[in-house]
Image (cartoon, rainbow, N blue to C red):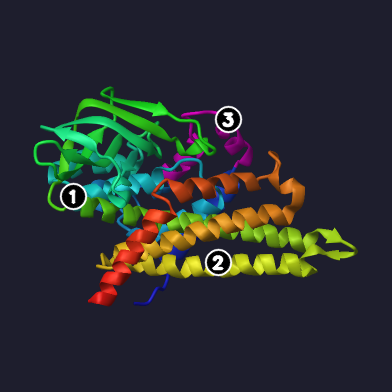
Amino acid sequence: MPFLLDDDHRQIVQEAERVLSDGWSPDGLRHLLERVGAHDDRFWTTCRDMGWTGITISEDHGGLGLGPIALCLTAEVVGRFVGGAPFLSTGYGVSEALRRFGSNDQQGRYLAGLANGERTGAIDLTSALDGGERLAWTDGRLSGATGLVAAGAWADLLVTVARDTATGGDVLVLVALDEQAHPEPVQTFDNSRGYAVLHFNSAPAEVLATEHAGDAALELLARVAVIVAFEQLGGAEACMERARNFANERQAFGQPIGKFQAIKHRIAEMYVANELARGNALRAALSLRDDAGDLVLRAGAARLTAIDAYEFAATEAIQTHGAIGITWEHDLHLFFRRSRALALELGGRGPWQDVVARRVIAGVAA
């Protein structure tokens, strides 16, 4: 399966880099870190104006219908600039849930709003990954509290997997986050992600899937994980470039510090980790594009290597910069915070390692 970018893809990347280069404000991101329940309105307005919110949504529903590869590439550029809102990936999870499992009526009511960015989406699907506690669903109503949900403080729609109290089985549901949902914003080390715990007390919820709902939830989570892997890859690349540029400029004992083996090898190791992550992300993107049966396995490999690459690059870039790298005024802590946030919010390494191992063993056994 070849992976060749066409002219549309290249134009999307170039325009995204141009727009975000002009508008990126690290001071604005620092300001967000000191507030709970806020997000970068300027960044989100850019996403809406550029049509990124509707990249994967069909033209029939007001989107661009360009497919997931275009969104992956956009996410990579967003990662390079530490975009100040999580809606591109979480909203994709909701629109994909509607596309795959929603009725014509549900798609008609919600997809256009997601495409133009008037509605924002969040997902709470990690219980399908680690077997965690589900919300309770009884006769079309949802009760209980979620874990920490990215975008939960602002989103209009949530897709989650719940336990049907009548049958004991899983059910994939869509719930409007209106006055019957009570978001509890949570202070974290990356407040621009809008983390919140959502409380429901018999809130109306619409069914998306009942048969194999746990598997459906895991596949949706895997789809979002591929998009996030590209965002992580963009962040890792930005950290490596900053470290490399600093090492070539900073002088010690009359020569650039990049000539010392300790620095040279550190940057080389960043490059290796990034390329490994890139290979897995590209392979997962092909499975995403083709709705392939190995999507969850490929997404798991992409997620694990992207977590490693971004966290390693962020940490080592700070080390390369010495003491200045960890100061509030320097931008690297923005990348470091984001690397930790993205490593955790779709489920951490352990559950994804289990998912990948189970699928590899099953494949070997077959």
Lower sequence index among marks 2 and 1: 1
Residue depicted at 60% across the width and 44% down the height: 334
**In magenta stretch: residue 21:** no
Residue depicted at 39% across the width and 70% down the height: 283
* Residue carrying label 1: 213
User: Where in the figure is residue 129, as x and y percent of width and height?
Assistant: 31, 52
> 289 or 298: nearer the eye?
298
Quarter that holds the C terminus? bottom left
Determine crowd level at label 2: few under 14, some 14-19, many 20+ residues with C-alpha closer than 10 A. many
Q: Is residue 244 left or right of residue 131?
A: right
Between marks 2 and 1, how big is the CA–CA gap? 35 Å
- Per the picture, the main secondary structure of the magenta-coloured stretch is helix
Between marks 1 and 3, how big is the CA–CA gap? 38 Å
Numbered mark located on residue 273 in the image: 2
Amino acid type, callout 1: Ala
User: Where in the figure is residue 218, as x and y percent of width and height?
Assistant: 27, 53
Amino acid type, callout 2: Ala
Q: Which is closer to the viewer, label 2 or label 3?
A: 2
Residue depicted at 33% across the width and 59% down the height: 66
Determine crowd level at label 3: few under 14, some 14-19, many 20+ residues with C-alpha closer than 10 A. some
Range of magenta residues? 25-49
Q: Quadrant of residue 175?
A: top left
Amino acid type, callout 3: Glu
* Extreme residue in the top direction: 179
Q: On screen, 297 above or below 224?
A: below
Task: Tell whether label 3 touches label 2 (CB within 8 Å).
Answer: no
- For label 2, the SS is helix
* Residue carrying label 3: 34
Lower sequence index among marks 2 and 3: 3
Quarter that holds the N terminus? bottom left
Q: How many marks?
A: 3
